[in-house]
């Protein structure tokens, strides 16, 4: 119930941004009634009825449905919590196990890499079958990925299902709410996309809590970073329960993805099945000529040309250097916490993850997305990277106390959420109609940030410990700030 109310409130927030001061508006009275000799509207003189105004209720429902889809997609950020319960046989590539940091720490990176591989297919499928059916395909893939992962006996099998299949499903469905929401509210893309993707950030709040209650109901703490067998024995059942929840959420959200009727958008595959068994329609006179004119309309830059442009490369490097900080903390805060005696409590670290999900990742996505509509991308992004770099530099010192460690983790995910909210809206603004296609390739910056994060971090840990790792990550954030200043 709390989750449903929260989603509804965020969707209502979009409505308030789209129609400011709606409560103060008064009905406009005609200055000259038709019965007097005053001026009449041309519609009344011509005997025409005013065109009906399209209800925006389906638009708000589409935003709400988009939040449900992203709630399922955002479960990927539960990996920082789930990895602590992972059975020993799934921690390393070798069945015999290993030493040092677990190879399974790369699972989040593989999910994001799979997501970015699936994203180009989303807009292509949408152009053929529409946003609703495209999102449904992604929903089924997400749920299937977790069900198959529950039977995995090696890390390779687990990655192919939990990371690859699930991640591809996320990629296919990810942009559908952005596309539909942008069609309903074109002047508030940042706010709409921030509201939708805030559910992705809030996902960890919901599913971290659910996961911990299901697999560790008695709140048993790990010994030497390892949970007893009675905890890991519940692993397979947990994945099946989560897979069912993700699929149900995403399927309901997908059903709500409808275009404005005024758009007049038609999809060839859908239209083909609609016309099966019906006689072919004879085109009216002049229809072919009009179609030729429409085809001859001047086209803008192609997707390929945009992807190889300088501004695309600049945005891509900005994503890579900025996102690597937050993604690193999102996937390793619990592992780092278990190594500190005063932080090593499963209940406490799960709480930190939940607070960071709602107060950090989710709130950050809505906040930075709406602020970018108001103040512009450049100012907001430069502010974000300043906060992020400062927090990263101080993170090791903030970990000295539970309260400051919690605040630091929340703040890092607050900035990470902003990265995910502002870049799609900015891409749609800069590249126009082909924005979704361009963002499919731009998102690879997040995938590489997730992949390089653990690799770079582990290498730095060996050379200089957490102090060196956190300082280098902060420096990367400052490079992103410098690039933003050149926009």
Image (tube, grey):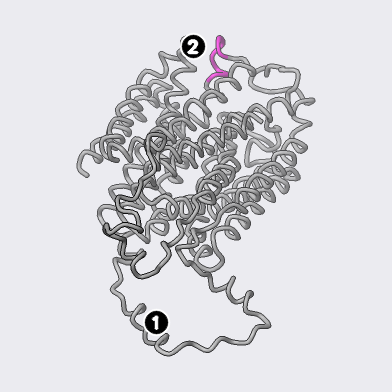
User: Magenta segment range?
Assistant: 337-343
Vertical side of 181 occupied by 342: above or below: above
* Residue 308 appears in the rendering: yes
Q: Position of residue 231 (x, y in %)?
A: 75, 26
- Image location (x, y in percent) of residue 253: 61, 48
The spot of residue 239 in percent (x, y) is: 71, 39
Tag on residue 249?
Answer: none
Res 403 label: 2
Q: CA distance from mark 1 to mark 2?
A: 64 Å
Q: Which mark is residue 291?
A: 1
Measuring from the top left, give residue 87's x and y in whole percent. 71, 33
Give the residue furthest to the left: 486
Residue 377 location, quadrant = top left
Work out which quarter of the rendered image holds the C terminus and state it: top left
Residue 211, image quadrant: top right
Dot 1: few (<14), some (14–19), or many (≥20) neighbours within 10 Å? Answer: few
Secondary element at image label 1? helix
Q: Indicate the quadrant where residue 246 lies.
A: top right
| Residue drawn at x 35%, y 65% as measured from the top left | 43
| Viewer-closest of 320 and 369 | 369
Mark in the foreground, 1 or 2? 1
Q: Main secondary structure of the magenta part?
A: loop
Q: Quadrant of the N terminus?
A: top right
Q: Name the N-terminal-most of marks 1 and 2.
A: 1
Q: Quick one: SS at disc 2?
A: helix
Crowd band around label 2 with a 10 angstrom C-alpha radius: few (<14), some (14–19), many (20+): few
The residue positioned 45% from the left and 63% from the top of the image is 263
In the depicted view, which residue is nearer to us: 64 or 207? 64
Whether 372 is among the magenta residues is no
Q: Residue at x 52, y 28 (%)?
A: 358
């Amino acid at each position: 119930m709390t989750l449903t109310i929260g989603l509804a409130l965020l969707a209502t927030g979009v409505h308030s941004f789209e129609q400011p001061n709606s409560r103060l508006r008064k009905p406009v009275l005609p200055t000259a009634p038709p019965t007097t000799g005053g001026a009449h509207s041309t519609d009344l003189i011509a005997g025409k009825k005013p065109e009906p105004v399209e209800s925006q209720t389906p638009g708000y429902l589409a935003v709400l449905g988009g939040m449900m889809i992203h709630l399922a997609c955002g479960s990927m950020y539960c990996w920082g919590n789930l990895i602590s319960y992972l059975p020993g046989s799934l921690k390393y590539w070798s069945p015999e196990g290993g030493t040092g940091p677990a190879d399974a720490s790369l699972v989040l990176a593989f999910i994001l890499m799979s997501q970015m591989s699936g994203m180009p297919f989303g807009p292509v499928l949408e152009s053929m079958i529409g946003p609703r059916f495209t999102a449904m395909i992604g929903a089924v893939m997400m749920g299937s990925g977790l069900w198959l992962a529950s039977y995995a006996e090696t890390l390779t099998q687990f990655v192919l299902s939990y990371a690859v299949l699930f991640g591809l499903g996320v990629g296919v469905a990810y942009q559908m709410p952005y596309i539909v929401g942008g069609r309903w509210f074109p002047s508030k893309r940042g706010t709409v996309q921030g509201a939708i993707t805030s559910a992705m950030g809030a996902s960890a709040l919901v599913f971290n809590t659910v996961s911990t209650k299901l697999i560790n109901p008695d709140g048993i703490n790990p010994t030497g970073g390892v949970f007893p067998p009675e905890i890991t024995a519940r692993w397979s059942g947990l994945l099946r329960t989560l897979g069912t929840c993700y699929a149900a959420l995403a399927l309901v959200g997908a059903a709500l993805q409808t275009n404005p009727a005024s758009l007049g958008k038609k999809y060839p595959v859908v239209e083909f099945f609609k016309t099966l068994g019906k006689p072919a329609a004879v085109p009216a006179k002049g229809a072919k000529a009009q179609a030729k004119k429409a085809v001859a309309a001047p086209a803008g830059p192609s997707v390929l040309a945009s992807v190889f442009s300088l501004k695309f490369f600049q945005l891509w490097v900005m994503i890579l250097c900025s996102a690597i900080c937050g993604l690193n903390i999102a996937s390793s805060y619990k592992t780092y916490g278990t190594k500190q005696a005063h932080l090593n409590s499963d209940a406490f670290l799960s709480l930190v993850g939940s607070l960071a999900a709602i107060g950090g990742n989710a709130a950050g996505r809505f906040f930075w997305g709406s602020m970018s509509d108001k103040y512009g991308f450049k100012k907001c992004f430069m502010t974000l990277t300043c906060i992020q770099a400062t927090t990263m530099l101080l993170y090791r010192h903030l970990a000295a106390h539970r309260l400051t460690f919690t605040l630091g983790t929340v703040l890092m995910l607050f900035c990470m959420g902003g990265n995910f909210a502002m870049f799609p809206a900015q891409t749609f603004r800069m590249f126009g109609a082909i924005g979704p296609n361009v963002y499919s390739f731009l998102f690879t910056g997040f995938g590489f940030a997730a992949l390089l994060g653990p690799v770079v971090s582990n290498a730095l840990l060996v050379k200089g410990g957490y102090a060196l790792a956190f300082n280098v990550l902060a420096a990367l954030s400052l490079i992103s700030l410098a690039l933003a200043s050149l926009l």
